[in-house]
Image (cartoon, helix red, strand yellow):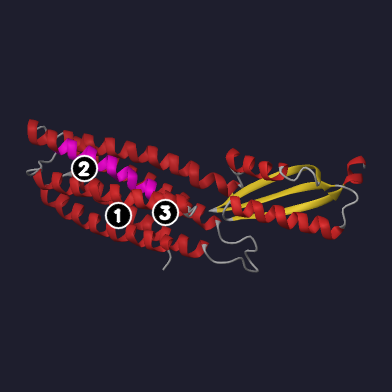
Amino acid sequence: MDVRSKAAWLSVASNITLMTGKLIIGLMIGSVSVISEAIHSANDLLASCIAVYAVKSSAKPPDKEHPYGHGKIENISGTIEALLIFGAAGLIISEAIKKILHGGEMIEPGWGMVIMGISALLNIIVSQYLLKVGKEQHSVALEADGIHLRTDVYTSVGVFVGLLLIKITGYQIIDPIAAILVALLIIKAAYDLTQKAFLPLMDIAADEETLEMVTAILDEYRESIIEYHDLRSRRAGRDIHIDLHMVVKPEMSIQEAHDLCDIIETRIKKEIVYSTVLIHVEPADMMKA
């Protein structure tokens, strides 16, 4: 099992643990904010399972039906996660409003504070690991899952503070209000995740830093290249597809131009991991046409 798969399965295990603990204690003490966190963790569990599938599927090599690989499945996974987060937020707000309108007493919040503290600590550890592996492996699915769990840290702390205030003041209405605040934080995280995961499905270009690396490498071969143009790029999960037109000196043979392209493509692939490079060579006299 590779490092990406291990990270994805770690997320699944932590979410099962937290979802079970939050649901049991939330029902035991009658807290809508703790139950909302259980719903959030159930949502995270489903998202983590999607991430496991996405990581496994995106690693498949190109085939006849997918000649450019399977990288975009990670973006699809991240987009689905974002939609799930929006859905969870809506459910939490609905349950909180019901409790505000109809009331409902809550038992001693102590156990709720315990599970929220454990949740925040565990999610800090797991989300940090997922974000680290996701960044190192250029995995959109793992980064999305890490962002997803990072929101749980903030929401768990928010619910913990709400339960603490209930313990101090005795005001039960703080519980549904805390749940609504949790939901608003979740919506913000879902929006950010949508931006990150969905835009590459529209063949968004690589970032400026990546493109600057490409042009810097091309500029190193100015003695052999007259000029280059039509530099394009697009992202598909962790993969980056780059293509360009390169004008070479007229005296250069086909073999020499081919060898030069191989050298430049190898350099770019070395500097930009998971990149695929295609160079179209043009002779100098085509510039006059």
Left or right for 262, reference 169:
right
Q: How many marks?
A: 3
Q: Nearer the viewer, mark 2 or mark 3?
A: 3
Q: Residue at x 86, y 58 (%)?
A: 254
Q: Over which residues does the magenta segment extend? A: 145-163
For marks 2 and 3, give the CA distance.
Answer: 31 Å
| Spatial CA span between label 2 and label 1 | 14 Å
Report the quarter where the N terminus lies: bottom left
Residue 243 in the image: state x and y as whole percent: 71, 50
- Residue 80 in sight: no
Q: Of marks 2 and 1, which one's residue comes earlier in the chain?
A: 2
Answer yes or no: do the residues labelled 2 and 3 have beta carbons within 8 Å?
A: no
Q: Position of residue 7 (x, y in %)?
A: 37, 59
Which image quarter is the C terminus in? top right
Find out whether the residues at labels 3 and 1 contact each other: C-beta distance under 8 Å: no
Which residue sits at x=56%, y=47%? Answer: 200
x and y, in percent, of residue 179 in the image: 24, 39
**C-alpha span from label 3 to label 1:** 23 Å
Rendered location of residue 266, percent (x, y) = 66, 56
SS category of the residue bearing label 2: helix
Residue 181 to residue 250: above or below:
above
13 or 35: nearer the eye? Answer: 13
Q: Is residue 181 visible?
A: yes
Q: Which residue is mark 3?
A: 133
Nearest the viewer among 108 and 148 is 148
Q: Which residue is mark 1?
A: 42
Can you tell which of label 3 and label 1 is closer to the viewer?
A: 3
Estimate how packed mark 1 is, as few (under 14), some (14 to 19) or many (20 or more) residues with alpha carbons within 10 Å.
many
Q: Could you tell which of marks 3 and 1 lies nearer the N-terminus?
A: 1
Residue at the disc numbered 2: 33
